[in-house]
Image: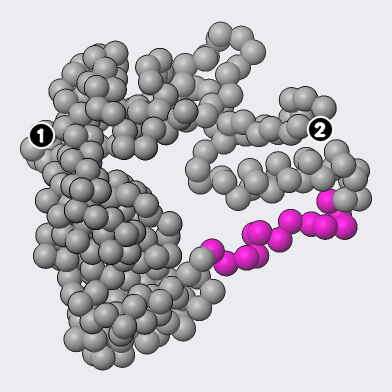
């Protein structure tokens, strides 16, 4: 990954040509067979919420601490800053403990200790038991065991919900024609159980074809639209608008990847309006 400052649109950080070249150059320094841009399937850019040091010494993003801190920013208002996605649970614990301490003192935390470190994540509670049935499930459904394991890896014990959906509508048990690694049920599940409201939600944050295919999942748009439109009460016009919006975003990000400067890349992405603006 790169680790550089970003001073452009915070809502849409993008990978530039310079970022891509940087990653390729470093990867190729240790590979016997060099990679080229033709080997790249997808890119991703995000922003780290780093805490700025009190002095400018060692203030580059690569050197700034990834630790988080909690403080009272105004009377009765606690805020947390810094950290990273992989420490989300302990960040939440520290933030709540900080607030409880301010309200009730140290006894508040000792009397009501955090328990989230012992609570299984969604899909984990019965994972081992369901995994023990994976060969049985595969045989009953006519699937490869690898298919069932894929579902277990993605949904854990919530695989039973998908199986119930398939029992109710057997067409959902078929692989997607444009993305056979995924079942049609997974697109439906994204809407019915994971809160997806747009095709972009599904492609970027549920099925994630945005990162797994060279066209960012664009070839699956019509098929996805046909699956989820009835679930979201979309008419033909709304479905077409969703498809057009996603294709435009893909074009904007591809244009950004051809620009070497952050400013030019950000402008290329900003030229494409969001179907639903991220900020008011």
Residue 223, picture quadrant:
bottom left
Seen from the viewer's position, the closer of residues 33 and 250 is: 250
Q: Magenta segment range? A: 109-121
Rendered image: mark on residue 127: none
**Residue at the spot x=16%, y=25% of the render?**
255
Is residue 115 inside the magenta stretch?
A: yes
Figure colour scheme: one colour
Seen from the viewer's position, the closer of residues 145 and 137 is: 137
Of mark 1 and mark 2, the one earlier in the sequence is 1
Does residue 108 appear left or right of residue 232 in this picture?
right
**Residue position marked by numbered label 2 in the rendering:** 76
**Residue at the spot x=38%, y=54% of the render?**
196
Is residue 53 inside the magenta stretch?
A: no
122 versus 110 height, above or below: below
Categorize mark 2 by other alpha carbons within 10 Å: few (<14), some (14-19), many (20+).
Answer: few
**Residue position marked by numbered label 1 in the rendering:** 36
Q: Secondary structure at mark 1?
A: loop
Q: CA distance from mark 1 to mark 2?
A: 54 Å
- From the image, state whether disc 1 or disc 2 is nearer to you: 2
Please provide percent x and percent y for residue 31: 17, 38
**Residue at the spot x=24%, y=14% of the render?**
264
């Amino acid at each position: 990954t790169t680790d550089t400052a970003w001073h452009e649109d915070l809502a849409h950080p993008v990978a530039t040509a310079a970022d891509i070249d940087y990653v390729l150059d470093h990867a190729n320094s240790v590979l016997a067979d060099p990679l080229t841009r033709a080997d790249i399937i997808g890119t991703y850019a995000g922003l780290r919420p780093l805490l700025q040091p009190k002095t400018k010494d060692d203030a580059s993003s690569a050197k700034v601490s990834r630790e988080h801190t909690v403080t009272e920013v105004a009377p009765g208002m606690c805020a947390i800053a810094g950290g990273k996605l992989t420490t989300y649970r302990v960040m939440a614990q520290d933030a709540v403990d900080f607030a409880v301490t301010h309200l009730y003192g140290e006894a508040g935390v000792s009397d009501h200790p955090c328990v989230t470190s012992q609570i299984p994540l969604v899909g984990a509670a019965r994972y081992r038991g369901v995994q023990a049935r994976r060969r049985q499930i595969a045989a009953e459904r006519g699937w490869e065991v690898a298919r069932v394991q894929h579902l277990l890896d993605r949904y854990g014990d919530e695989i039973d919900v998908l199986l119930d959906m398939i029992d109710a509508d057997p067409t959902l048990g078929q692989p997607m024609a444009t993305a056979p690694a995924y079942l049609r049920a997974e697109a439906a599940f994204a809407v019915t159980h994971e809160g997806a409201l747009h095709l972009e939600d599904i492609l970027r944050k549920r099925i994630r074809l945005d990162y797994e295919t060279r066209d960012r999942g664009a070839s699956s748009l019509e098929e996805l639209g046909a699956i989820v439109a009835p679930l979201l009460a979309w008419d033909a016009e709304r479905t077409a608008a969703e498809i057009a919006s996603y294709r435009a975003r893909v074009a904007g990000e591809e244009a950004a990847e051809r620009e070497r400067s952050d400013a030019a890349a950000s402008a290329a992405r900003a030229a494409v309006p969001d179907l639903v603006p991220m900020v008011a």
